[in-house]
Amino acid sequence: MGGSDGQAGKAPLSAVDIGGSFVLQYYRTLTTDKDNLHKYYKDESIASRGTEGASPDEITYTSGVEEIRQDIQASFPSGASRAEINCIQSLESKQGGIMVLVLGYFVYSDSSKVHFSQVFFLDKQTEPYAGYFVQNDILRYVTGKGEPSDAQAESPPLLPPPQPPAPPTPAPAVQAPPATTPAVDYQTEARAAAAAQEAQAARDLAFAQEAQAAEDQSAAKAIATADASEAAEDKPQRSWATMAAEGNKKGWALPPAAKGKAQAPAPAATSSTMPVLPPPRPTRPARCT
């Protein structure tokens, strides 16, 4: 956008004047010559387009003249015959730049209107001529604020506008019945435990009695064996003559008893041929005179 800070002998233009002049030129180009609207931007320009209530993923961001030109062709409403501007608010910014806020409506051929708000940051330029260009551009379409045409205002619709369907009522959650804890009969449990202890004691006693009986039986057998052995050892032995006499009575023939061997006679004493001499007589010792 061309412009000048001032001419010789004249006061420089204010931010309000520059902002108002830019808005008139920009929206006239938008509605009558949209193919040349990108000429208000440069390669360092950044633009954003979105709709009220849109998520961050639904907002578009473009930079550079070519991307902004394509975005203008796709995003600006086609069929808008003019733009009605309700508010222009301009403010001088850093290094001579100007902030411009615009509120208004796009008017279509069927007289319907779409509300929008748009913010520009105009930065100063020296090439190809002194003036301003759009450094930043934020456009937001405001839904639900369109104004009906005069004909629509005079003849209200016969039927009320359709209401959005009510969200389905969620089915009530089925809750499981609370778990009931069975009543505990402590007396019955105590009696059962006592009966179990008594049965175990009876089994232990029977086992001990059986073990004691087996031990007593083993001891009795050992005692009987020992008594039999002692009786056999204490029984007197019979002589051969007694057994022979009993055998003769019963008709048994027993061999005669073995005779003992004759003992050799002791050798007779022989007399010695040596002469027997009388024992020597003791001598008296010599007496000293």
Image (cartoon, helix red, strand yellow):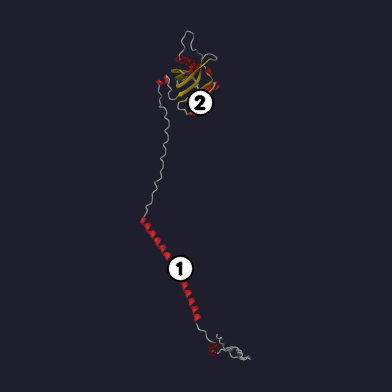
Give the image location of residue 208, x and y in percent: 44, 67
Give the image location of residue 16, x and y in percent: 45, 15
Judge whether residue 233 can be spotted in this image.
yes
Judge whether residue 72 can be spotted in this image.
no
Label 2: few (<14), some or many (≥20) within 10 Å?
few
Label 1: few (<14), some or many (≥20) within 10 Å?
few
Q: Is residue 257 left or right of residue 112?
A: right
Q: Quadrant of residue 167?
A: top left
Q: What residue is pinned by disc 1? A: 211
Vertical arrangement, residue 163 with respect to residue 19, above or below: below
Q: Amino acid at mark 1?
A: Ala
Disc 2 versus disc 1: nearer the observer = 1
Mark 2 vs mark 1, CA separation in Å: 99 Å
Q: Nearer the viewer, residue 284 or 173?
A: 284
Residue depicted at 39% across the width and 59% down the height: 193
Q: What residue is pinned by disc 2? A: 60
Residue depicted at 44% across the width and 69% down the height: 212
